[in-house]
Structure formats: structure tokens, C-alpha cells
Amino acid sequence: MQNPIKPFVEVSKNILGKPETLGFPEEREELTDNYRGLHRLDMKTCISCAACERICPNQTIEMVETDTDKGVKKMPQINWERCLFCALCEEVCPTECLILTKDYSFEAYDRREFLKRPEDLG
């Protein structure tokens, strides 16, 4: 037969002990070196090759027309809702203008906010 007091002792330890979770957003989890987070695009070095669009296994990236200081160019638009964060787009980019950062904070009330135009990826 189980001791009826044991559950109360365990609960008391948990209530009086140190919290197990981080105080997000003030405290952030420490990430490993190979962590793949949100994308960042350097629009000045992008050559509009569309290699990222072709390699994406989930068809997350679409090349869209964007106004730049050199005129209208096609640049990658990324749908974070569909992204696997596999980093194939980063690996195939010849100018290394598209990279995955360590930023992992993306939340939205509307799913349309996950569709990021090239200007939003800077």
C-alpha cells in the first residue's frame, strides 16, 4: 500500500523549490552552434538566381518582384509557416545572402504574418 502522505510531500517540494522553466522573454534558452532559426536576407548581395526557391523541399520560398536601389529584382519571399528550417536554401546560396540566424521568436495572431517579403527579412 502506498503512503498517502508521499504525494503531498512531492507537491510541497515543487511549490517551494526553484522553477523549472525560464522566465521568457527576459531569459532565453542557450542555443547550440548548429541551431537553425529564422532567415535573414541581404538584399544588396542577392543576385536573384532562384537557387533557394528550386532547392526548397517544401516549396516555402517564392521569388517575388521587389523594388531595390538598382531597380526591380526578384527576391525570395519565405513562408515560415511551411518552412522545415532544413537550411538547404542557405547551403545552395552562391553569394551567402540568405542565412538562418539563431532567432527563434516568431509568433503571430494571423497566419498571414508568417509570409515574409524580402524587405521583412533584412
Image: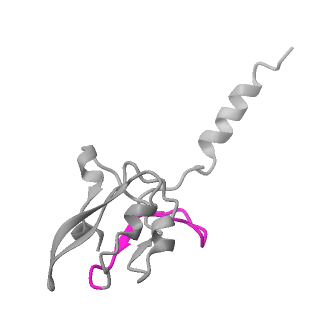
Q: Is residue 49 left or right of residue 68?
A: right
Magenta residues, start to end? 26-44
Task: Give the percent coordinates (x, y) of residue 117.
Answer: 24, 63
Which image quadrant: the C terminus?
A: bottom left
Task: Give the percent coordinates (x, y) of residue 66.
Answer: 17, 70
Magenta run includes residue 19: no
The mark total stands at 0
Which SS does the magenta portion mostly show? loop
Nearer the observer, 84 or 70: 70
Task: Give the percent coordinates (x, y) of residue 104.
Answer: 44, 61
Write the residue at 65% across / 36% down: 12
Write the residue at 46% across / 64% down: 37
Q: Is residue 107 left or right of residue 4?
A: left
Write the residue at 87% across / 14% down: 1
Residue 67 in which image quadrant: bottom left
Residue 26 visible (yes or no) = no
Q: Is residue 71 above or below residue 105?
A: below
Magenta run includes residue 40: yes
Residue 44 in which image quadrant: bottom left
Write the residue at 18% across / 67% down: 65
Q: Is residue 102 above or below residue 58?
A: below
Residue 98 visible (yes or no) = yes
Q: Is residue 55 left or right of residue 11?
A: left
Nearer the observer, 21 or 92: 92
Q: Is residue 48 left or right of residue 54?
A: left
Task: Give the percent coordinates (x, y) of residue 116.
Answer: 27, 60
Report the coloring of the rendering.
one colour
- Name the residue furthest right: 1
